[in-house]
């Protein structure tokens, strides 16, 4: 009997378990989670399964039980390297800050695999919210592998666009089941068709595309932008509003969010005329606004809007979209309005606390005023012609 194919999944958090792990496990793969959170590893190994509650806006919840899973302690480098050497695929969803910690054991597993199975490439699915993920992985792994190691021949670095929304779990829900996850029904995994060195995994909702950069930018400048705009406009219009769906029911707010997304869509079509069409993006915007309004998901304004340093950065969802529109001489007035609203964002979690980095933002950046924030947080420069125009339009 043919052994079950395997996926080694670095990161057993929300995306790792509710999206990547779910897709592979329900497609006939055994999933090996790698995580440094010992209670999580122990809980997965005690049960060898976990539940995901699929939250739908117009139908009853569905409980999906994910089986054929186990976990390894990320600090057990020998065991993890062995798993990497022997697996069919690797995926990562650990977050940018944790990636440097997994590269050494990943490199060790890649080297071991090349010795053990010459000519059997390993494809690594980069399920991270980062730009140029393949280049970052390549540079990081090359520094750790022996000089002259044929990385390009042995390893496929597959960038993705992750659109699945997974809310923060409440303490009371986790108290009854520490492995429980809530997630929306959406399960499309967009991947770089050209990143693979071996065969593509047989996943029904896998969508291999020719130009992954177009879809990464679509995610950032339409999905992430629209979500953030809903949070910032919602808090600005009604500071007591808790959920994204409630924000979208405020007078005129959904229309304003749609306009911001459409301004960005127009710029994306100019940037990627061979990959994206206005008609397809209009449909995408309709679908996103429907998903944002999913009451059952319980996504909060706090979760969606928090981390202002990151979300106001030059290449992130708002300023990045504005710069793209400005380069194509297209309007971005409503996106600029979202930037102004973000400066006053003060949403708190269920215990009444600001996000820690936002406390720093309020203390260190807000006293500088909008102009100072555009300079020091958004990275806009008066010396650059396009930046100077953007600064002027956001300020006035």
Image (cartoon, grey):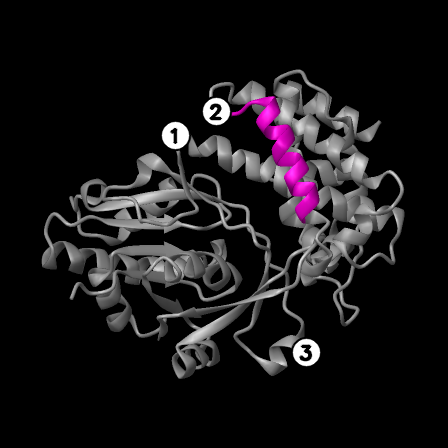
Q: Quadrant of residue 56?
A: bottom right
Magenta-tinted stretch = 275-291
Q: Position of residue 83 (x, y in %)?
A: 25, 66
Above/below status of 199 relative to 256: below
Q: Secondary structure at mark 3?
A: helix
Q: Name the residue beneath numbered marker 1.
A: 210
Q: Position of residue 178 (x, y in %)?
A: 55, 78
Alpha carbon of mark 1 to alpha carbon of mark 2: how far? 8 Å
Pick whichever, 63 or 357, lies toward us.
63
- Looking at the image, is mark 1 or mark 3 earlier in the sequence? 3
Q: Name the residue beneath numbered marker 2.
A: 275
Alpha carbon of mark 3 to alpha carbon of mark 2: how far? 44 Å
How many neighbours does mark 3 have within 10 angstroms: few (below 14), some (14-19), or many (20 or more)?
few
Q: Name the residue beneath numbered marker 3.
A: 172
- Residue 368 seen anywhere in this rendered image of the structure: no
Q: Position of residue 282 (x, y in %)?
A: 65, 29
Q: In percent of the image, x 63 and y 32: which residue is there?
A: 283
Above/below status of 361 relative to 312: below
- Looking at the image, is mark 1 or mark 2 earlier in the sequence? 1
- In the rendered image, residue 290 lying in the magenta stretch gets the answer yes
Q: Residue pushed farthest top?
A: 329
């Amino acid at each position: 009997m043919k052994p079950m194919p395997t996926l080694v999944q670095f990161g057993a958090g929300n995306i790792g378990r509710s999206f990547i792990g779910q897709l592979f496990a329900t497609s006939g793969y055994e999933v090996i989670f790698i995580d440094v959170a010992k209670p999580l590893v122990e809980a997965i190994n005690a049960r060898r399964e976990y539940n995901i509650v699929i939250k739908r806006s117009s139908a009853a919840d569905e409980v999906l039980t994910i089986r054929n899973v186990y976990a390894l302690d990320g600090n057990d480098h020998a065991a993890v390297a062995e798993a990497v050497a022997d697996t069919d695929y690797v995926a990562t969803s650990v977050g940018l800050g944790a990636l440097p910690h997994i590269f050494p054991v990943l490199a060790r597993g890649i080297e071991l695999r090349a010795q053990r199975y010459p000519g059997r490439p390993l494809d690594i699915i980069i399920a991270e919210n980062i730009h140029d993920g393949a280049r970052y992985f390549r540079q990081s792994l090359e520094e750790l592998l022996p000089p002259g190691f044929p990385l390009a021949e042995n390893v496929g670095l597959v960038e993705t666009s992750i659109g699945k929304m997974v809310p923060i779990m409440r303490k009371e829900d986790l108290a009854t089941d520490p492995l429980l996850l809530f997630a929306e029904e959406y399960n499309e995994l967009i991947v770089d068709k050209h990143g693979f060195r071996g065969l593509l995994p047989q996943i029904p909702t896998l969508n291999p595309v020719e130009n992954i950069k177009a879809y990464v930018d679509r995610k950032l400048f339409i999905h992430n932008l629209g979500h953030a705009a809903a949070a910032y406009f919602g808090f600005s219009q009604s500071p007591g509003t808790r959920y994204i769906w409630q924000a979208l029911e405020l007078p005129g707010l959904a229309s304003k969010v749609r306009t911001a997304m459409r301004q960005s869509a127009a710029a994306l079509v100019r940037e990627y005329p061979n990959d994206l069409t206005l008609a397809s993006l209009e449909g995408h915007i309709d679908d996103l606004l429907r998903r944002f309004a999913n009451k059952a998901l319980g996504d909060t304004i706090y979760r969606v809007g928090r981390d202002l340093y990151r979300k106001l950065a030059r290449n992130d969802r708002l300023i990045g979209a504005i710069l793209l529109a400005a380069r194509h001489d297209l309007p971005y007035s409503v996106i600029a309005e979202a930037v102004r609203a973000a400066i006053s964002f003060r949403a708190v979690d269920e215990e009444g606390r600001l996000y820690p980095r936002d406390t720093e933002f309020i203390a260190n950046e807000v006293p500088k005023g909008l102009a100072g924030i555009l300079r020091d947080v958004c990275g806009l420069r008066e010396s650059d012609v396009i930046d100077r125009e953007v600064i002027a339009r956001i300020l006035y």
